[in-house]
Image (cartoon, helix red, strand yellow):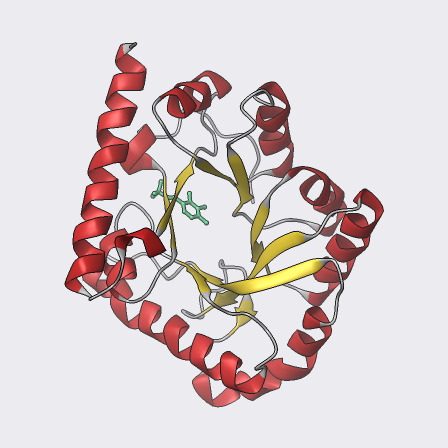
Amino acid sequence: MSELIQSIRERYLAVLDRIAVAAKSAGRDPESVKLVVVTKSQPVELVRAAIEAGVKIFGENYPEEGVMKIQFLQDFSAVEWHMIGHVQSRKAQLVAANFNYFHSLDSLKLAKKMDRFCGEAGRRLSTLLEFNVGGEDSKGGWPAWDEARWQELSAELAEVFSLPNLTVRGLMAMPPLGETAEFSRSFFQKVKRLQEYLSFQFPQVDFSELSMGTSMDYEVAVEEGATFVRVGTAIVGTRKYQTETE
Ligand SMILES: *Cc1c(COP(=O)(O)O)cnc(C)c1O
């Protein structure tokens, strides 16, 4: 095994171990947490090494870069590709036609486009709704920092839930960056409360998945109910190049 594969494998298994410990400490089944390895701005050779190291789910942020990797690595058909970054409407088709899962749906306009392109491609796309729970301007997602105003989201979300080719499965969030993992906890708890609120408002919709937690705070996220954690640098190292700005 090459040194690169070996080192990715060690870090991947170490993160899986820490997820299991965090899950058990919260009384959760470790199997209920899926690890998305984030490879944005990493070269395709590194992604191939990660596949050989045993990684099953990849997260990409930029549609073109992701599609390039998906096409290059299409022989590895057991691998899943998740779009986790902000998607501009004009790139919806790339995501609809190529990705297995969409974590970062953040507007009705994009939802409608994505639904139409999925229909044309004859696919249904598993989708999470991204919420902005910290109130930062730089972050995407439906505004959800003020719990007193959650009901204002209902009309627009109801339209999203009516789209036939998007299968909503839960929520995603990216809290403000803090100095410590503990700083994220209250934001993860807010996402959990929003999940409960939406489940009550829309009992016909499945909100069981929660995508939250990165290299710096994934254990806290698991303690607070994450079913997907999105971990990049802790497994594949620092990013090698920058393709696009978000
Ligand atoms: C880059 C990114 C991650 C992973 O961040 P790391 O600090 O490298 O673990 C997770 N989620 C999103 C949305 C990202 O853009």
In the image, 102 versus 199, the foreground residue is 199
Question: Who's the residue at 60% across and 54% down the image?
Answer: 126
Relative height, residue 176 to residue 75 (above, below) = below
- The answer, for residue 86, to whether it is visible in the render is yes
**In which quadrant is the C terminus drawn?**
top right
Task: Examine the rendered structure and indicate whether residue 19 appears above or below residue 194.
Answer: above
Give coordinates of residue 85: x percent, y percent. 54, 47
Relative to 55, say whether 202 is above or below.
below
Residue at (25% x, 18% y) in the render: 6
Choose top left, top right, bottom left or bottom right for residue 64.
Answer: top right
Question: Which residue is depicted at the point 55% across and 70% down?
Answer: 206
Q: Is residue 179 visible?
A: no
Percent x, y of residue 169: 55, 63
Residue 86 in the image, given as x and y percentages of width and height: 58, 50
Q: Residue furthest right?
A: 120
The image quadrant that residue 15 belongs to is: top left
Residue 76: % across, % down: 53, 23
Out of 146 and 29, give the one closest to the viewer. Answer: 29
Residue at 63% across / 38% down in the picture?
A: 63
Q: How many numbered marks are there?
A: 0
Q: In this rendering, would 111 be left or right of 138?
A: right
Quarter for ligand 1? top left
Residue closest to the eye, 165 or 194: 165
